[in-house]
Amino acid sequence: MTKRIRWSWALCVVAFVGGIVLGSAGSRAGEFPAEWFWGKPDQRAQHEALYGKPMPELKLSDWRGTEVTAADMKGKVVVVDFWATWCGPCIGSIPHNNEMYAKYKDKGLILVGVCGSKNGQEKMSAVADEHKIAYPIAKDATLESAKGWRVMWWPTYGVVDRAGNLRALGLKPNHVDAVVEKLLAEPAPAAPAAAAHAADAVPASHVLLAAAADDGAVKDAWREGDPASRARFADLEGKAPPALSVENWINGKPMKLEDLKGKVVLLDFWATWCGPCINAIPHTNELQAKYKDQGLVIIGVCHTEGSEKMAQTVSDKKIEYPVAADVGKKTIMAYKVSGYPDYYFIDRAGTLRIADCKNGSVEDAIKALLAEQVTAGATASAR
């Protein structure tokens, strides 16, 4: 049975107050040396956008060892290691992870190994036995956790402070200890007296946003993120989508969204350097084959960085749906894309209905939107 690790509204309040207590340095990029991290500046910027915020959701299953809950994490420093069974550097880091866990677990450290990538998850327990993993591990079966944490390579280490805020992401394995030591030295934030009743203090705007997000055919549960994080989409959903600023079309002629009314359009924002994006290609091909005759159009919008490899990736990975390269990141910025892959839906009336759909809910959204009928001259039924 799948287990979601969520920070409640109460914990979010604690995290917010803790951020104030710890000071602004803990929430800014540049707190730790750049050479401690993997990735190009553009990739690191995507990680840094999450700093100082409550840790992204973990949706894990098939725990090996003690299952870790949100209650277990409260007041602790948490290291999340996204790894894969086929990844040599991941396997090579296991002894160091074991040493770090043994050294700091009694001082307030929790270490969770998140086995990601669709390929090889079935070998998790065997690999754990062979390499004597001593800390809790679990599967990211839907890959939603990797998406939320913006995992672009394996291993990806994230470190969360005692207040529940993400402080470092994409660390090189040999620098994780230094971050852990710094955060363990910080005091746990004191819970405010009102924290116990924080659930009653949810801003009305958040409640209204959540209520408005479920328009009948589209379920709010299909959308990625909580109401607060989704507030940035308020000027996108329910309206005509931004134009696509793309070039170098493959697998089809250039398309404009205004010419696709009557179709359901799935925009798949991906990158040639993004592991989860590459792993998702076979499933996206299946969706293309299954629903294209019912009115589905899939367009893969390739990130500008690495787009010079797009044609080769299309060939190597046998992409069967149309793809095009974003021009100067204009499309990504217009749609406020924050991770890869990200999925956006435009309905038959030409209205953006879902900005950032959960990976595991893409097919549900396809079926719901294809089932809708739009009469001539009708506007979207979304809002």
Image (spheres, helix red, strand yellow):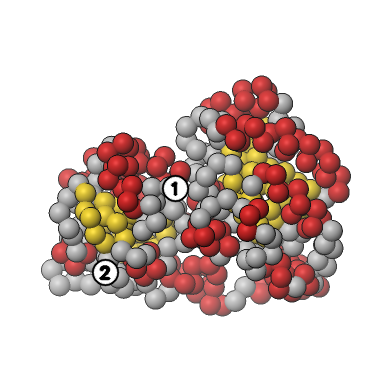
**Residue at 73 percent of width and 58 percent of height:** 161
- Tag 2's secondary structure? loop
* Position above or below: 313 against 19: above
Q: Which one is nearer the viewer's eye here, 7 or 336? A: 336
- Among the two numbered marks 2 and 1 on one chain, the one whose residue lies closer to the N terminus: 2
The amino acid type of the residue labelled 2 equals Ala
The amino acid type of the residue labelled 1 equals Cys
Q: Residues within 10 Å of mark 2 (few under 14, many from 20)?
A: few
* Position above or below: 195 against 312: below
**Residue at 32 percent of width and 51 percent of height:** 308
Residue 242 percent across, percent down from the top left = 30, 70
| Alpha carbon separation for disc pair 2 and 1 | 24 Å
- Tag 1's secondary structure? loop
* Position above or below: 97 against 54: above
- Would you name the residue on which mark 2 appears? 243
Outermost residue, front direction? 35
Residue 101 appears in which quarter of the rendering?
top right
Residue depth check, mark 2 versus mark 1: number of the one nearer the observer = 1
Give the number of the disc on residue 274.
1
